[in-house]
Image: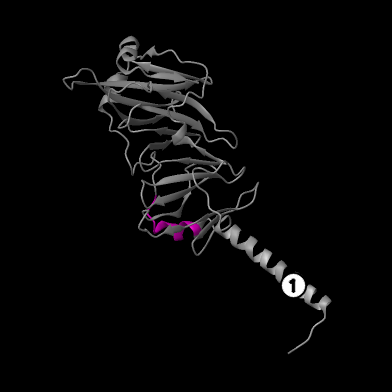
Amino acid sequence: MTKISIGRAIHLLVISFTLFAISTLVYSADEHTFSIDDPSVINLSKLVGQRIKLRPITFEKIDDSMGAIGLMLADQPRRWGDPEIVSPKKENDDKILVSHYRETVSRLGKTLTIVRQNGSPLKFRDWSEAASKTAEGDGESFRYAGRLPKSNFHQIDVHYEHDSPGSFFVSAGSGKIMYAHTGSDLVSISKNGQKLLVMNDGLNPPFGFIVSALAEDGHGVELACSCPANKKSRIIPFFKGWHINPYTGFDVVLLVKTDEQGTYEAIPVRFSKKNSEWHVYAPNPQRFVQLVSLSCWQ
């Protein structure tokens, strides 16, 4: 049996402990993955329905001199596949897009890494847990979906085993992280790439939406609209797209249940930002408020 001194044994023990600590740190870093519950993530879908702005907006009568109401009603609603709609990409696009943005994006096995100008790299790691006798299986897989059009934000899609997909939006500059349920909510980016709309589908009242500026810091919410939490009447929204001339904004047609017999009325609504102020227009503002009970703040 080989004999070693006490000093030599202590020295080897220190080396072994150091190597173990380093390997543990590396493993932990590789294992870390982001979720919508991470404190650094701004969950835009969760903000829908919350009163996070203080100044209420008074609804105004829409100018129909150019036939705006008829055009809004006739225009086709925007859906998945339209350029204005932010939706999860095909999973096989990941490899192509990672290669295209390889200066700041990389993938090693199950880990997708985003390099930020400010802050440490972000790691999104696929994981899966098999079902057991007491719990269902679960898991998440992350796919890189490129940059949001005309913006400085990466899009990372997350596919859940038991939920509709969502997307993280990471600023390439500040590293700010936002999230939205792109699989269930309607998420749309403005034509100039400066604003993001997140609107729920109205299937589970109350109906609501927010508009967030794609800013480098803060939640960026400029406009928040929602119905009262106790309002149970059905509202089905149809997003009709963005406009940038003469003002930035968007159009929505709300299909509102008006009586117990199941009668619905289609109400066109225009949202426009003029000189840093949001305005909301409807054909008959008083009737709109009575039927929809929608409140907006900025």
Name the residue rendered at 62%, 42% in the picture. 174
Q: Principal SS element in the magenta part?
A: helix
Where is 250 relative to 7, above or below?
Answer: above
Check the picture and name the quadrant holding the N terminus.
bottom right
Q: Nearer the viewer, residue 96 or 36?
A: 36
Instruction: Look at 67% across and 67% down and name the residue there.
Output: 20
Asked whether residue 144 is drawn in magenta, I would say no
Residue at coordinates 18% horizontally, 20% vertically from top-left?
Answer: 263
- The residue nearer to you, when weighing 13 against 101, is 13
Q: Position of residue 226 (x, y in %)?
A: 40, 23
Is residue 64 visible in the rendered structure shown here? no
Q: Any magenta on residue 90?
A: yes
Amino acid type, mark 1: Leu
201 relative to 34 in the view: left or right: left
- Mark 1, Cα crowd under 10 Å, few <14 / some 14-19 / many 20+, is few
Q: Position of residue 114 (x, y in %)?
A: 56, 53
Across and down, in percent, residue 257 comes to 24, 21
- Horizontal side of 294 relative to 222 (left or right) equals left
In the rendered structure, which segment of residues is drawn in magenta?
Answer: 89-98
Q: Nearer the viewer, residue 171 or 231?
A: 231
In the picture, measured across the screen, residue 157 lies left or right of residue 73, that is right
Mark 1, residue position: 13
Q: Position of residue 24 (x, y in %)?
A: 63, 63
Outermost residue, bottom direction?
1
Question: Could you say whether the residue bearing mark 1 is in a helix, strand or loop?
Answer: helix
